[in-house]
Amino acid sequence: MKIRVESTDIEGVFFVHPELFRDSRGFFLESFREDVWAAEKLPTRFVQLNHSGSVKNVVRGLHFQWDPPMGKLMRVTAGSAFLVAVDIRKDSPTLGKWVGRELHYQEPVLFWAPAGCARGFAVTSDFAEVQYLCTGTYNGNTESNVLWNDPRIGIEWPVSDPIVSERDQRAKTLDEWLSDPLSDVFRTERI
């Protein structure tokens, strides 16, 4: 298995392009292989797999968790979706910056965003499924979210008439989160 790792403007956030084999029957790929990922100095310990299905224009996020710290390896397995990571690490030179890209199931690219990044996505096809491997198990007591359309962040969501959960509509802005003493958990030396 070969992979190509594409870095982004945010430290620790990557797009991973696995080797893809196509023929008349369809395709095959290894979306994760520990030895190959370890050789590229990518995360290799995942403890939870989540699977989400959503209709067009659904926006989920921007979610994060601090105990245990949760990084996510995301992949679109049906349809297409715009995946996003926002740096929320207080001491990061890219604090408040975002990286996003529309991914399609036909071109399997994986998106890695470490703990210290808020993650989300918007569905751009009629229906999409997103699966993500997590480095920490879910803990509802230590998770939160940042407002998906916070003007300070300025994500250019490629959807019209977004469908957003009540919880995500009530999320804190990035500045509100950063003024919370809990936000100190996301200093780069701690994660």
Image (tube, rainbow, N blue to C red):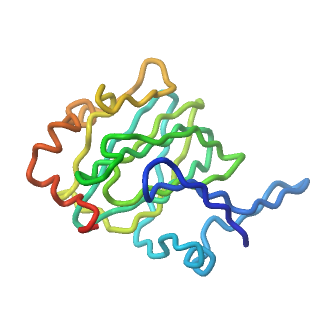
Query: Residue 152's quadrant in the figure?
Result: top left
Pick out the residue farthest to the bottom: 35
The residue under the point 66% across, 46% down is: 105
Residue 98 in the image: above or below residue 162: below
In this view, the residue in front, 74 or 173, is 173
Give the image location of residue 61, x and y in percent: 35, 41
Q: Is residue 75 left or right of residue 121?
A: right
Coordinates of residue 107 in the picture (x, y in percent): 70, 48
171 over 85 or under it: above or below: above
**Quadrant position of residue 84:** top left
Q: Identify the residue at horizontal 62%, vertical 45% (top origin).
A: 78
Which residue is most to the right? Answer: 24
Name, please, the residue furthest toward the top.
161
Image point 48% across, 47% down: which residue?
9
Image quadrant holding the N terminus, namely bottom right
Q: Residue at x 71, y 46 (%)?
A: 106
* Extreme residue toward the left, this view: 181
